Each structure stands twice: as structure tokens, then as C-alpha cells.
Image: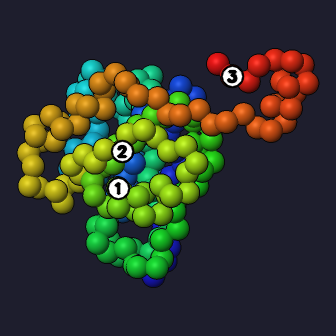
Amino acid sequence: MARIQSFAPIAGAAAHTLILGSMPSRASLQENRYYAHPRNAFWPILRELLNVGKDASYASGVRAMRAAGIALWDVIHACARKGSLDSLILPGSVTINDFTSFFRSHRRIARVFFNGGTAELLFRRHVLHRLDYPPSQLIRLPSTSPANAVLSLDRKLEAWRQIVQPVTVNRPAPPLPASRLRRRRSTGASTST
């Protein structure tokens, strides 16, 4: 079974919110875009929440998401999987994306929303303990996958509304590198606030 690989993140410099999926579906990989399956509720929900027209293009949805300070990525970088379901990912085949570098480059991200339970489980198991300064909020949302038929689109939309609420928490700032501390001390500048 061939390994499949996820996409690069969609993230602007001012991103404060990150949405994480597990791994792109077969349809998404074929289309080379996030959430390409026609019955996946992700883009209908995002278009509604970001006031983008129902028939807006993928590019328009991505622009609106970036303008709203929302980033998008998957927890898994690569894996072996038959089909599209998370339950079909071969155990032991998973390689996780480089979140240490990602969060260093996107220091404003204060909250992470998981698109379903697999993304949350993998992030908590493989990523969270490696982060020196993790986001302040980690919140699981109902999966937008068509396989999650338990909830209606309206109920999913209601749960997802929190992604557009104002960010009320900040990620703790990492300490200054030792070289900057030495420079401040040598110039007599105070390191306290």
C-alpha cells in the first residue's frame, strides 16, 4: 500500500486560530485541495460563518479564512491508508507534521479547533507534549465528514460558530533567547516588565 502525504498549511502571518483535520480524504488528494469531497460540510460551514457566498470558489474561501485569522492544516504528514476513513489508517504508518516549527512561525495562534476526534487524539498523543508553548485552547468540534451523519448540517454549523468568536486568550510568550538577554544586560536595559 502506497503512502499518502498531506498538504502544506494554509496560514497567514496574523493567524490566531488553527483548524486541524487528521489527513486529507482520497477526493481531497485527487483535487489537491482541503475538504474536496462534495458532501463534506467544511466549506459550506466556513462560507456561512465567514459570510462568503454559497457558490464561492475554493480560492475565495481560503482568502476569507486567512483574512479572518484562521489557519488550516492536518495533524498527519504522511501515512498508509486504504480509502478515506481515518479508521483505515494503518497503525504504525503515521508521520506527524512539524508543529514545533509551525508554532514558532505562527506565534499568535492561541487556539486550536479539531475537526473531529481523530485529529484531537493524534495531536494530544504525538504533538502536545513536544510544544514548549502550546496554544491556550484546544477544542474538539464535530467532524464535517460525510461519515459523521449523526449530526445535521445545522447542528454542526452551530457547534462550529465558536471559531469566529473573538480570541480572548493569548499564547504565553516564549522567553527571550539567551543572546538577547545578554545584550539587554550589557546595555543596562531591564528584563522585567
Q: Please name the residue shown 46% across and 29% down the image.
A: 170
Q: Of the residues under marks 2 and 1, which one precedes in the sequence? A: 1
Question: Is residue 92 found left or right of 35 in the rendered image?
Answer: right
Name the one closer to the observer, 183 or 93: 183
Residue contact at pointers 2 and 1, CB within 8 angstroms: yes
The residue at the far right in this view is: 186
Label 2 to label 1: alpha-carbon separation: 8 Å
Label 2 to label 3: alpha-carbon separation: 30 Å
Q: Please name the residue shown 26% across and 31% down the image.
A: 162
**Helix, strand, or loop for circle 3?**
loop
Give the image location of residue 81, x and y in percent.
39, 74
Label 3 to label 1: alpha-carbon separation: 36 Å
Give the residue type at disc 1: Glu
Q: Please name the residue shown 50% across and 52% down the image.
A: 7
**Helix, strand, or loop for circle 1?**
helix
Give the image location of residue 185, x and y in percent.
85, 25
Residue contact at pointers 2 and 3, CB within 8 angstroms: no
Give the residue type at disc 2: Leu
Give the image location of residue 144, x and y in percent.
23, 48
Q: Residue 138's mark?
A: 2
**Which residue is under mark 3?**
192
Q: Of the residues under marks 2 and 3, which one precedes in the sequence? A: 2
Q: Residue 120's mark?
A: 1
Give the residue type at disc 3: Ser
- Quarter holding residue 57: top left
**Helix, strand, or loop for circle 2?**
strand
**Other residues around mark 1 within 10 Å, as few (<14) / some (14–19) / many (≥20):** many
Give the image location of residue 173, x and y in percent.
59, 32
- Quarter holding residue 13: top right
